[in-house]
């Protein structure tokens, strides 16, 4: 059985699956075959499902009997290992044996199953989603490079065709960073759009669930299945879910696309900055009006998100710290979780007040624009052993640089996507970030899809 | 001119004012005369208005010309000195000269003025509303006793008839505690019911504005004028304001009154506990059904509110601390503001999580009850020099004891009132606290009014 269907987007597989020309069993077998062939080098999966083939056979029966559940029916999907699953263990990237998690389905996983998707395994994450490296997972484009993180396993698995799509989670950029570095699409919807019950928490007020996919259309399909009320997540209201595929294929004519000239530009790798400027020109050529603007208070954003993220994460892990389990954490994660104790309550509150200022600043900006376009990351995938990178003439820590352009949309809760927009001189993918107003995922998808249609970077594929 | 009208509730004055039989000028002159006679001993005012008599003359003209603004037109009202006022300075109880406040009207003050009220002066508070003593203000019932706090000046002024009503603010009990200790009515409405823009902040997520009045009916009149949208307070939505006077005079028949037997009972002064038990019996005799219940998690409440209050207050005062102004604060307040730095961000977040549990616990309880009745304070007014009191056989700090029964309704944001329910063996007033679901102020007023009608403790008055 050829693995070829896993290189194709879900949108293309749907008619074949529905017509019986392609079997979910063949899809899952192809995924398992690719995992066998490649994942020894990639290390993107931490667990492969024992029941996926049975699930695929059941899906094949259902489809054959005309009980079609929709566009995800029979599609092999991987799940970041911080989503609880009833049929697979969850480790959230930690090797501390005393930290265990219930074996039950998270909201998002239950929604995928209800939509007919076949969950083929759990992907690796940076421990507790607290980092952008995801060791020891490798980047499919260059095994010496990192896949990004924290959803690095999901990014690598989707890019390498080990799954048709994967779930990620995004607290400061953890979906968009691996999407940018691996060359997939990565969508972080609005805060509260996808319910997070059953995801191991990182920072309650910053955590988002979302998909990594091969195309923008696939992101729309997954969002449609994942969005909706989650009684277990107080941040997830019962708000109507539009048909996100309706946003695809619309022209950009008349749209006002904002380019935030401070913070997001002037401190990116040369190839990243020029690829994004080219993309902005392409959007203008496609009919959009480009408007430069500034969000001056963004310079205080890093301090604010660190105060919130450290406080929240340490509040969650405090029970483990008190139990003396810290030495079992990876050194980088242990440091972050321990220094969270040093953030004061007053500092936490000042960070929350700054967040409100930032939300208001962006709201004002959106009176004049419909979407924002930025680089997704200021750098492409870096070497596994790099801790600092040279950007715009000066050294910067990879941790600081990697999420510099993504975290503003976690602080503000606005939807944002990363779509491929080319490759740097070393052949590593570059990500274009597109954001919109809260709950305007349709706008994000519309702009991203229009861009993708004219620049299909998927014709280039990693050699594994 | 006799001061007698200031001993009568606003409800009784309204027809006389409207008919021209009583003049706003006479009312303000009576208030000023009482202030001159008594406030040297009480020390409830920190500033007396220079423009109130002009305002009263204007009100008299308006009423004479038939331009009646409603039941507060021409009524002399005092304002706690943490509400900004355009015609009087604001000090928020501090004597630090480098801390200054704008001279402009707060939302609540502007609303009172729009309703025709005459603002006669600013009342003393515990510095920055951070305490329950309000030195050097004295209790009108016994000058050796404290008036409670932090709105101690408002409680003393209303009880002594120096104003028809007064504004207070309540972060952990600062309206209801002086109401209980001085024998007035004190209403803390639902979080967000009265906009707080222009009140010097103490703790954003716990601060409430509200009135101290002579009667429950007067509290309904003031709430009607004060409630409504405040664009300057993000916590204050544009939500319809009912006619709160409609709740008055309704029978208690069929109402289910809950008595929370843990936390609120078993650790009160004997006279307080027996007065409240008698009041519960009276409510039952008036037709209400009494239901005992428990809120087990309340034992963790004090730690939670302290973490939130200390963090928020220190975040606000941090600029003063950094400027080296701490030595100018009162020692007790300085300690609280400085130790706020020691609350960690993770502890703050755990406190917020506990708050959510408590809100859910109360929401569940309210499926079986319509209102909650408790003592307002476990003790009556204590001596000025007391730092600990004997309660139920053991010593307790007055600070800890004074707000023990009020703060749960700040953490949960539910409306609560203190109404007089008798006197202890030393002649000091006892307060009955009545609470209801969020935005059900009508229920609070209904139960309090029904109780008040059958037990008018106002026939007894302090001798000054």
Image: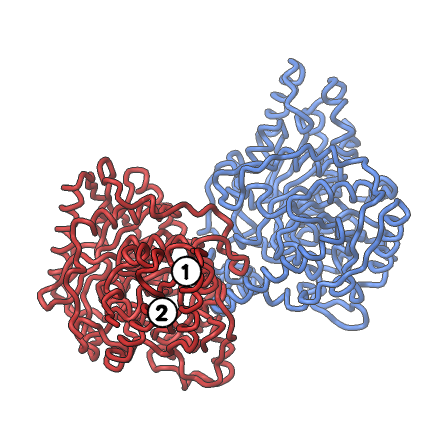
Chain colours: A red, B blue
Left/right placement of residue B400 relative to residue A319 reads right
Residue furthest top as drawn = B65
| Callout 1: SS | helix
Q: Dividing the image into 4 quarters, which one contains the N terminus of chain A?
A: bottom left
Q: Are marks 2 and 1 on the same chain?
A: yes
Chain to which mark 2 belongs? A
Residue B325 visible in the shown view = no
Could you classify mark 2 by the number of other residues whose Cα lies within 10 Å: few (under 14), some (14-19), or many (20 or more)?
Answer: many
- The residue sitting at 85% across, 43% down in the picture is B253
> Which quadrant of the figure has residue B48?
top right
> Which quadrant of the figure has residue B302?
bottom right
| Callout 2: SS | helix
In front of the other: A27 or A395 = A27
**Label 1 belongs to which residue?**
A64
Left/right placement of residue A455 relative to residue A88 reads left
Residue A235 visible in the shown view = yes
- The residue sitting at 64% across, 48% down in the picture is B438
Where does the image place residue A365, in percent across and percent down from the top left? 30, 42
Residue furthest right as drawn = B285
Where does the image place residue B288, in percent across and percent down from the top left? 85, 47
Name the N-terminal-most of marks 2 and 1. 2
**Label 2 belongs to which residue?**
A25
Left/right placement of residue A262 relative to residue A337 reads left
């Amino acid at each position: 059985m050829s693995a070829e269907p896993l290189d194709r987007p879900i949108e293309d597989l749907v008619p074949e699956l529905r017509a019986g020309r392609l079997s979910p069993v063949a899809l899952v077998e192809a995924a398992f075959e690719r995992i066998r062939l490649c994942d020894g080098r990639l290390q993107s999966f931490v667990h492969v499902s024992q029941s996926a083939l049975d699930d695929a056979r059941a899906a094949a029966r259902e489809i054959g009997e005309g009980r079609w559940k929709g566009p995800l029916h029979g599609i092999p999907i991987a799940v970041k290992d911080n989503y609880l699953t009833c049929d697979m263990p969850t480790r959230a990237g930690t090797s501390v044996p005393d930290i265990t998690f219930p074996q039950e389905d998270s909201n998002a996983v239950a929604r995928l199953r209800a939509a007919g998707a076949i969950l083929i395994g759990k992907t690796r994450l940076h421990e507790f989603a607290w980092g952008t490296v995801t060791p020891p997972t490798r980047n499919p484009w260059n095994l010496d490079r990192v896949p990004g993180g924290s959803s690095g396993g999901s990014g690598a698995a989707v890019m390498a065709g080990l799954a048709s799509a994967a779930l990620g989670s995004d607290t400061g950029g953890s979906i968009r960073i691996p999407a940018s570095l691996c060359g997939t699409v990565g969508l972080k919807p609005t805060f509260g759009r996808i319910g997070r019950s059953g995801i191991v928490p990182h920072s309650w007020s910053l955590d988002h669930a979302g998909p990594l996919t091969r195309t923008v259309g696939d992101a729309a399909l997954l969002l449609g299945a994942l969005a909706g009320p989650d009684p277990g997540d107080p941040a997830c209201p019962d708000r109507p879910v539009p048909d996100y595929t309706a946003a695809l294929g619309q022209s950009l004519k008349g749209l006002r696309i904002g380019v935030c000239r401070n913070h997001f530009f002037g401190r990116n790798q040369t190839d990243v900055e020029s690829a994004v400027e080219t993309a902005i020109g392409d959007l203008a050529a496609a009919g959009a009006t480009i408007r430069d603007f500034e969000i001056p208070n963004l310079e205080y954003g890093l301090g604010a998100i660190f105060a919130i993220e450290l406080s929240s994460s340490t509040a969650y892990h405090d029970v483990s710290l008190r139990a003396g389990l810290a030495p079992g954490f990876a050194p980088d994660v242990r440091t972050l979780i321990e220094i969270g104790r040093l953030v004061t309550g007053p500092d936490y509150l000042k960070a929350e007040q700054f967040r409100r200022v930032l939300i208001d600043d962006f709201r004002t900006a959106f009176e004049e624009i419909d979407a924002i376009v930025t680089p997704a990351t200021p750098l492409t995938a870096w070497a596994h052993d790099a801790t600092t990178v040279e950007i715009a003439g000066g050294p910067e820590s990879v941790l600081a640089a990697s999420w510099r352009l993504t975290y503003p949309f976690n602080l503000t809760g606005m939807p944002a996507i990363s779509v491929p927009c080319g490759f740097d001189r070393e052949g590593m993918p570059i990500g274009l970030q597109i954001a919109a107003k809260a709950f305007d995922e349709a706008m994000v998808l519309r702009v991203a899809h229009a861009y993708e249609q004219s620049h299909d970077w998927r014709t280039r594929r990693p050699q594994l």
